[in-house]
Amino acid sequence: MRFRSLPDTRARAGWFAGAVVLALGAGVLSAPWPAHLGDSTTGDKALAAEVREATDGVERMGMSVALLENGRVRRAGLGDTGTGAAVTSRTPFEIGSVTKTLTASVFADMVEDGVVKPDDKVRDVLPDREWKRGSVGDVTLAELASQRSGLPVMPLVPKTFANLLTYPVFGVDIRSAADAEELIDSAATSPRPTPGEYAYSNLGFAFLGQVLAGKAGVPYTELLRERLLDPVGLQETTVPRSRVEIPAGAAEGHDGIGRHVQPWIGIGSAPAGAGVWSTADDMATYVDAVMRGTAPGSDATKPRYPAGESRIGYAWMTSAKKGGGSIVWHNGESGGCSTFVGFDRASERTVVVLSNTTADVDAVGVELLTGIDESDEERSASPLAAGIGLLFPPLAGAALLVAALGGVRPSRRREPSRARIVSAAGSGLFLFAVTYAGAAVGALSIAGWLVGSALVGAGVFVAAVRWRRLRWVDEKYRVFRWVDAAFWAVVGLVFAIGAAG
C-alpha cells in the first residue's frame, strides 16, 4: 500500500514542532556534557589556582596535586572524589601506568644487588618453566623494562577483546581476574612482531614484574613492599587484591562525561598499573627520592634507548623541554583516573598530578613542572571519536524518521511495518549509547547529539501518528523482520541502560 501523506494542518504542524522541541529538550538534558571540576579547594589555594588555569578548559571531577620546589612541598586538592567529599593530598587515586616506574625501580634495585642482570633472558631467570624457541622466553629483562620486548599492548585473549568492546559503554573492569600465572601464560603464547624496537606494552611490564617476583620467590606485592615501598616510606601506596580492599576515602574514577567507571583490579597486571593506589603525598615523596637518587633503583631513570622523540630508561621517559633542558616523567591511565609524575633535575622541581577522570593530565603536569604552557601539544581527539560524536546521533535519528515515513524519496515510499520502526528505534538507541560512551567530549559531539535528538523527535511523531493502522510485519521475510526487530530492541535497550550507568 502506497504511503499517504500526513494531513497538512496547523494543528498537526504544531504537534510536530512540539515533538521536535520536546526531543531537543531531552537531548539537552541527556547530552554527553564534559565532567565538571567543582569549586572545592583544599591545601595551597595559590597552587590550586595555577592548576585550574593549567587545565585549559578540559574539565575533570577532582584533582590532587603536589609540587616540590626550593625544598618545600606545596599541596592542593580540587573538586571532589565522586562521593561528594573534597579531594586532599591524602586522597587515594589509582595511579595506573605510573606503577611501571615502581616496577622499574624494583628491577634496577635487583640488578644493583646482583640478583639479576639486565641482559638475563626470561628463560634463564625462570628455568623451571618451558619456553618455546623464539618466544618471550628469549626476551631480556632490559628489553621488558624499556618497552622493547615486542609484546602486544594487552594479552591477546578473548576476554581482553570482549572487555575492550564493553568497557566504554558499561565501564566494567577490563583487567578482571588475571592472576600471575594467567598473565605469564598469556605472555608466553603472545606473538612478538617487533622485538628490539620501542613499542609500549602493558603486557610486557606486567610480565616483567611477575618474572622478578618468580625469581624472588614471593608475590609481586610483597616484592614491591620489601624492595621499594617500605624503604622509601610509602605507606599510602597499596595493591588491593579485591574491591573490598580499596583504600577508604579513595577517589572514584569517571570517564570524560562524569560517568562512574569501575576501578581496575588484577594482581597479574598490577606491575603494569592495574589496581594500584596511592596519594599525592606518597607519590611526591617517591618522585623526590628518585630524583635525588636516595630511592632504591633510582638508576632506572637513566635514559638508555630511543623512544620516539624522547628516550627511555627503565620505564621512565626523558624528554626535551621548550627553552632547553629536559624532564623525566611518566604518566598513567586506569579505571577512570589519569596521572602524571615528573621531575626536572636542573631546577630540583618535582610534580605529581592525580585526577579521577580519564582526560589526561600531561599538559597540566608539564606546565607545573616547567612553567611553560605546552597545551598546544596536548593530544587532540582521534578522528574516529570525533566522527562518532558528529555522525552517529544524526544517523540514528534519520534512520527512525525514514523508517516511520516508509522511505526517503516520496515517490517510492511504502507503508512501513511496526517491526521496521522498532528495529530502527533499537539500532538508534545503540548508536546514541555508543556516542554517549565513546565519542570525543566536545562541541562536535553535542552538536551531533542535538541534531540527532531533533530527528528522533520527528521520527517518533510520524511513527505515533501512523502506528494504529500499521501491520506488525511485512508478509515478505516475516520471520527475519521479527528477529531483526527483537534483536535491535534488546541490543538498544541493553546498551542504553549500560551507557546511562
Image (cartoon, grey):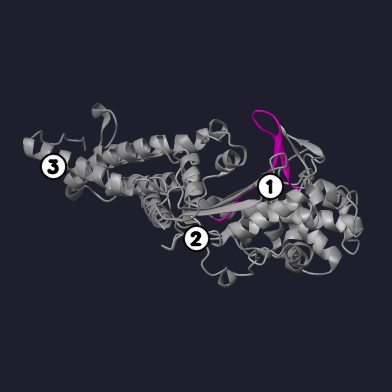
Q: Which mark is residue 83?
A: none
Q: Nearer the viewer, mark 1 or mark 2?
A: 2
Residue 144: where, in percent of width, then height?
80, 49
Q: Is residue 410 left or right of residue 209?
A: left
Residue for badge 1? 153
The amino acid on which the numbered mark 3 sits, given as a three-letter code, is: Trp
Marks 1,3: beta carbons within 8 A? no
In three-dimensional space, the C-alpha distance between marks 3 and 2, rounded to whole angstroms, equals 44 Å
The stretch drawn in magenta includes residue 328: yes
Q: Is residue 313 above or below residue 173?
A: above
Residue for badge 2? 252
Q: Which residues are magenta?
A: 315-335
The amino acid on which the numbered mark 1 sits, given as a three-letter code, is: Val
Please tell me whether mark 1 sits on a helix, a strand or a loop. loop
Marks 1,2: beta carbons within 8 A? no
* Residue under the image location 91 percent in, 61 percent down: 127
Residue for badge 3? 15
Q: Nearer the viewer, residue 167 or 83?
A: 83
In three-dimensional space, the C-alpha distance between marks 1 and 2, rounded to whole angstroms, equals 25 Å
Q: Is residue 245 left or right of residue 103?
A: left
* Residue under the image location 44 percent in, 39 percent down: 57
